[in-house]
Amino acid sequence: MRNSKIMTMSEAVERFIFDGASIGVGGMNVVGSPTAIAHEIVRQKKKNLTLLGCNLSIAADILIGAGLVKKCESGTCNIGFRGIPSMAYSARKYYQEGKLEIEDYEHLAMVSRFLAGEMGLPFMPVMSSLGSDILTYKAPSTGKKFEIIDNPWNPGEKVLLMPAATPDVSIIHAQRVDELGNVIMEGFLTHTPEMVRASEKTIVSCEEIISSEKTRDYPEMTTIPHIYVHAIVEQPWGSHPTATARYYGCDVEHLRMYQECAEAALKEGKSGMERYEHYLQEYVLSCATFDDYLEKVGGVSRLIELKRKMREEM
Amino acid sequence: MGDTVYKKRELMVIEASKYINDGEIVFAGVGLPVMASTLAQKMHAPNITLVVESGVIDPQLKLVPLSIADVRITRKAAMLGSLRGVLGCILQRGMVDVGFLGGAQIDQYANLNSTVIGDYYKPKVRFPGSGGANPIASHAKRLLIITPHQPRRFVKKCDYITSPGYIDGLYGRKNAGLRNWNPIITVITDLCVMDIDSTLYRSQGSPGSGQLRLVKLMPGTTIEQVVENTDFELIMASRIDVVDLPTESELSLLREIDPEGIYFQE
């Protein structure tokens, strides 16, 4: 019998997230946010975090709003929907108030950095970002952000090099994982496979745990093999209020409510700050587990409604 | 047809759809770009392939999605891949014919800003940042920018260039090292249609300046209105046409995709 990596959320975060860690954040905008893992990080108050990802969404924004993040390296911090790009409001607030560094990249540069990391390479050529202010500005704590070289095989052609990104630990939410840590993802993958394979450790929360016997019947369906995974937490609805493909749709009303609280903290001074703190207290800190949170956001009837929404829209 | 009732944004989308040709690969963000692509697909370009940065390849959309990562945008796709698969293996590889963009600011060289207003380190307002926009601007063969037309948006120089247009002149992109150095850029606003004064349109005999150029007016708009709402000197094409009014079939197809009018609230 091989060792199982299944554990509770509190154990996973206690063992693998540490103060000062760089954390790769899975998901994108309104899908696949590792919200349940982020909540536990807030409860355990892991500090001075650096977040890496492509489109940092609500999981990242909650960590920022809880005052635990010093820096983001990302393509965007966006919780926009209905075609309106909308800056994640805690990220906006902390950046505008000078309490958060954002190292601006773009999605192709970020995924190329993860690609270098996962292949054990020091950097990766990227042919975008050129001519933009992404190359003009860097975050105060960043050393060398990039290099431009002359293509050795085509003299005169500029090639941009971006450094490998290798997070200490990645946090992702997936559909199915077996007890060894083989991850089966459904729907689009965004930057998740590259990021996980570039990371030192990975925590995966999932909708369902399956048996590795089942995985081995169709091993070509495995998105990420177990060697990259260190902690598995069974947490259905673990990416609420964002969606998980084939399981449930996005809870637009809750996302909007979150953004309103975070916007209030930015724009309405003390009372606004209290409103955001109330959100954290009510939905994160006063919950012993993510299941308690799921009860508070509407419980079984609301969750079934989100399931139905996914079925109707796919 | 003269009394057809339509919204300005509907006509912007309908006009944009005409710049997509059948058989092309189209990189679309959610919102008006997806609407324009889907409309083109239903009108004159059934063989276009839509790609979306989250990893979606060739979806068959029924309802307008809420975001690029909304599951609605995966409906009946040919493949759900990864961000690298789309941004790297399709876009950077040079396979995208048309890419859509937008931004908080656009300047005289069609550079776009979706990062900050004001100083980068001490901004008045911080926006989400590039996302997939910079790679689209870098690599799509043609760019379509759909944006409202206001003086605060059409500025002489962007506070921050998130996505490069012609940067600082006709050879700006070439000097920066962008392989795709002279893309066709079309800007569609509620007032007009603009393109780039470039070598590609050398009919005037000039080598071009790489700046935005007025080519068409929206029905009922005057040149003065465009000038008033643009915070830099706009180059005028030798002939300025008027955008066609929308047809009943264009409008009804558009309203089928967005029955709730989510994207057309004015």
Image: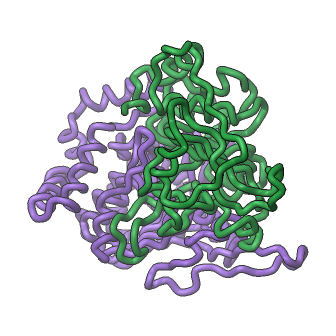
Chain colours: A purple, B green
Vertical arrangement, residue B48 with respect to residue A196, above or below: above
The x, y position of residue B84, in whole percent, is 66, 54
A292 on left or right of B62:
left
The x, y position of residue A281, in whole percent, is 14, 56
The x, y position of residue B207, in whole percent, is 81, 61
Q: Nearer the viewer, residue A43 or B165?
A: B165
Q: Nearer the viewer, residue B207 or A141?
A: B207
Q: Nearer the viewer, residue B64 or B211?
A: B211
B39 on left or right of B24:
left
Residue drawn 35% across and 76% down?
A: B122
The x, y position of residue A127, in whole percent, is 72, 66
Residue drawn 69% across and 53% down?
A: B196
Tell me, yes or no, if residue B212 can be seen here: yes
Residue A207: quarter of image: top left
Residue drawn 19% across and 50% down?
A: A283
Q: How many marks?
A: 0
Residue B93: quarter of image: bottom right
Residue drawn 66% across and 35% down?
A: B241
Tell me, yes or no, if residue A285 can be seen here: no
B76 on left or right of A67:
right
